[in-house]
Image: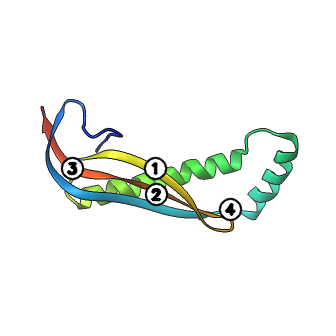
């Protein structure tokens, strides 16, 4: 699967647009991570538990978008973006989206 943040895939020509490909996941904070983050905020530094959670969340969302694009019959996604939002106290959504397309070598 080719994924591009631009409106094209270098070296390939778009042959068809298949539609919007989406991937999403919602994660909640773990109480243990909250406590550790609270302590870490006193002394400063990276909140590694949250960084790991966000990396896992982005990967899951990306995997779901790729699966959706494949279901649409696409071999590439253009205009790829991530978006994050808070849904409720302690819960966040990561959304990935882009335009699913088919391509051929230019």
Q: What element carries label 2?
A: strand
Q: What element carries label 1?
A: strand
Residue 91 image-quadrant placement = bottom right
Indicate the position of residue 59 as horizontal and vertical percent values.
48, 50
80 lies above or below 67: above
Mark 4 and mark 1: Cα distance apart in space: 20 Å
Return the residue at label 1.
Answer: 82
Return the residue at label 4.
Answer: 29
Indicate the position of residue 44 as horizontal and vertical percent values.
82, 40
Contact, mark 2 vs mark 1 (Cβ under 8 Å) = yes
Camera-side mark, 4 or 2? 2
Return the residue at label 2.
Answer: 95
Q: How crowded is mark 4: few (under 14 residues within 10 Å), some or many (20 or more)?
A: some
Mark 4 and mark 3: Cα distance apart in space: 35 Å
Q: How crowded is mark 2: few (under 14 residues within 10 Å), some or many (20 or more)?
A: many
Indicate the position of residue 32 as horizontal and vertical percent values.
77, 60
């Amino acid at each position: 699967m080719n994924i591009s943040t631009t409106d094209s895939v270098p070296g390939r020509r778009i042959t068809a647009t298949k539609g919007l490909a989406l991937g999403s996941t919602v994660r909640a904070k773990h109480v243990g991570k909250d406590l550790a983050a609270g302590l870490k905020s006193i002394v400063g530094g990276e909140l590694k538990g949250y960084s790991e959670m966000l990396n896992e969340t982005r990967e899951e969302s990306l995997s779901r978008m790729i699966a959706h694009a494949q279901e649409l019959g696409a071999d590439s996604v253009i205009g790829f973006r991530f978006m994050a939002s808070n849904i409720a106290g302690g819960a966040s959504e990561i959304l990935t989206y882009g335009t699913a397309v088919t391509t051929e070598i230019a």
